[in-house]
Image (spheres, helix red, strand yellow):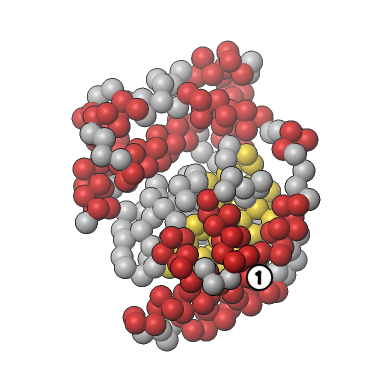
Amino acid sequence: MVRMASLNQTDSSDVPLYFAYKRTSEHDGYMETFHSHQGIEILLIHRGSGTMVVNHKRYEITPGMLCVFQPYQLHHLQLNYSDNEPFERSIAIFEPTMFEAYFEQWQGLHAFYKHIYLSRLAFPCLYGLGDAIELSNVFHSMEERIGFLSKKDQVEEISLFLVALFRALKPVWQKREGQAVPSDTRKTHQAERILKWIELHYAEPFRLEMMSKDLHLSPYHLSHLFKEAIGISITEYIAARRVHQAVMLLTATSKPVSLIAEEIGITNSSYFCSFFKAQMGITPHQYRKRWRR
């Protein structure tokens, strides 16, 4: 599995792809925290409904939906099982720089590949793909091969899978990107106002009364609205956002742990170590050491 900066995952190994084809969860069998990955996640949804939060915005989860989560992009899925409908999805998570060389012989495809993992995308999700037959077939083909791969064939087969996946994705994505509607025409949900406020203030001591005053909503309404829309409490989200930032700083910089604690709004480094361990299962020092080994 690719090494991931995930808020609910601390293990790592040498397999350069996390892959699943039509994985199914039922009756609250899929529970996810806000998290991110060091690599790219491509998620194709076959069945299910609910809400997704990416970049402080909410998106409705529908069948025939494809999402791209860029490196270190915080995201969360809240599933709706009220109609006993399962959640079925195909997933590929990989480190994009590891496979870029395999795209270089195709100029247009290479440019699209770099655009997907490096550019500021107009949107994280495509809707209305129906059965997404071509994309689904690419995942299915990999599913049939992946169980028989020897270690020496892994990188080559994964690269062929990714080339086919991006080749199928390119015309669909570029067509929708050309038709993208300016974001200011989209109706904003109240919960997104709260998410944006948190993004500006998560590194400060949190006071619900201050948020309530700034957003002109009562503390009770704020808390209830956020929990209903996002699936977790405001304090739980702020904890996830702080840990997410700490993970980025631990892996991408050499800043002392005490300074990282201050930069995410925690002035006591001992408390930060306990807080980080409660969220990640290991201390900040252990996380940095494991990441760089």
- Can residue 196 be seen here? The reply is yes
Q: Quadrant of the C terminus?
A: bottom left
Residue beneath label 1, please?
A: 168
Packing grade of label 1 (10 A; few <14, some 14-19, many >=20) is: some
Pick whichever, 82 or 250, lies toward us: 250
Pick whichever, 109 or 4, lies toward us: 109
Taking the spot 57% from the left edge, 67% from the top edge, the residue there is 90
Pick whichever, 212 or 145, lies toward us: 145
Taking the spot 64% from the left edge, 59% from the top edge, the residue there is 66
Q: Is residue 109 above or below residue 281?
A: below
Q: Quadrant of residue 81?
A: bottom right
Q: Quadrant of residue 253?
A: top left
Taking the spot 26% from the left edge, 35% from the top edge, the residue there is 255
Q: Residue 53: where, in percent of width, then height?
A: 58, 43
Task: Report whether 138 appears left or right of 71.
Answer: right
Please count the marks in the image: 1
Q: Secondary structure at mark 1?
A: helix
Q: Residue 228: where, in percent of width, then height?
A: 61, 37
Taking the spot 58% from the left edge, 54% from the top edge, the residue there is 115
Q: Amino acid under label 1?
A: Ala
Q: Residue 29: where, in percent of width, then height?
A: 51, 59
Q: Quadrant of the N terminus?
A: bottom left
Q: Residue 191: where, in percent of width, then height?
A: 62, 32
- Can residue 80 be seen here? The reply is no
Task: Report whether 123 appears left or right of 268.
Answer: right
Q: Is residue 143 above or below residue 237?
A: below
Task: Report whether 122 appears left or right of 115.
Answer: right
Q: Quadrant of residue 236?
A: top left
